[in-house]
Each structure stands twice: as structure tokens, then as C-alpha cells.
Amino acid sequence: MYKLLVPIDGSEVAERAMQTAVSLCQKREGETHITLLHVASVEYYPGMAVASVNINLDETVSKEGEELLQESLNKLKNAGIHVDYVLLKGYAAKEICEYANENGYDMIVIGNRGRGAFGELILGSVSHKVLHHAKCPVLIVK
């Protein structure tokens, strides 16, 4: 079995990474599997918890992640490839690497930028961290 892990965050480049993973699987003979992974994290919502005391931030971020994953799964419904999804909580790069390592993925296919250059500047590039800490090959899609 050929297993690809595709982290998604709703960005255009994550969409391209997802389509690249599908192309890679369609070119291989035999059983292939794609897992879409979203890491629900408050790191993309600085200050929101302070401004919205009455909102359960954790629940809101998780719900948005679940909706994103389901929408992405629906886009791949007719691709002819086994696709599932996982929602995790924590720091994106750390969770992506740990999940890939613990579950024996053959490759991580990830977009080079997520929610914008400002977030990358402040947080460091998730794709860069994954590239350097994953134990499997990493394909970075522009």
C-alpha cells in the first residue's frame, strides 16, 4: 500500500497539494491511500480568546477544521482512491510529523505556504519544519 499524508488548512496551495497527491496515487499501480490532515490550532487566531470570552474557542476551531476536512473529502469522492481524514489539535508541524511517523506514511505532500506570509513570518514555515523533522520524504507543492 502507498500511503500519502496531505496536511490541509483551506489555502489555495493546500488545495494544489491535495490534487498533486491524487495525481501521484493515480500514476501508481496497486492500492493507494490518502489521509487529509488538519491541525486545529489557536496559533492562527491570536487574541481571539481574549476578545471573545464567551466563545469556546477550542470547539469553534475544531468545528471549522471538521467542516474543512469534510469539504475536501467530498472534492476527492470520485478520484478512485481511498481517502480519509484526521483532525488533530496542537502545533501544526509537530502534529504532522508525529502523525506521519507513528502511522507509517510513505510521503507527506504539503503546500509551501498556508494562511499567508504574515503568519509564516511570525510562526515559522510549517512546511519548512515538516521538511526537516519528518522521517519520510516530503514533497512541497508551490
Image (cartoon, grey):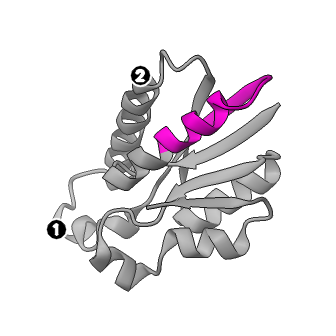
Give residue 123's quadrant in the image.
Answer: bottom left
Seen at 74% across and 60% down, the residue is 137
- Callouts 2 and 1 close, C-beta under 8 Å: no
Residue at the outermost front position: 27
Q: Return the disc, 2 or 1, that comes first in the chain's sequence.
A: 1
In the rendered structure, the answer to whether residue 60 lies left or right of residue 38 reads left
In this rendering, the answer to whether 59 lies above or below 48 is above
Residue hosting label 2: 74
Seen at 56% across and 35% down, the residue is 23
Residue at the outermost left position: 51
Give residue 27's quadrant in the image.
Answer: top right
Seen at 43% across and 61% down, the residue is 142
In this rendering, the answer to whether 22 lies above or below 114 is above
Residue 11 visible:
no
Of the residues shown, which amino acid type is indicated by label 1? Ala
Q: Decide which of 49, 82 is in the foreground and name it.
A: 82
Question: What secondary structure is marked by label 1?
Answer: helix
Residue at the outermost bottom position: 121
Of the residues shown, which amino acid type is indicated by label 2? Asn
Q: Decide which of 111, 25 is in the foreground and name it.
A: 25
Q: Position of residue 129 (x, y in %)?
A: 60, 75
Q: Position of residue 127 (x, y in %)?
A: 54, 68
**What stretch of residues is rendered in magenta?**
18-35
Seen at 47% across and 25% down, the residue is 76
Q: Which mark is residue 51?
A: 1
Tell me how many marks there are: 2
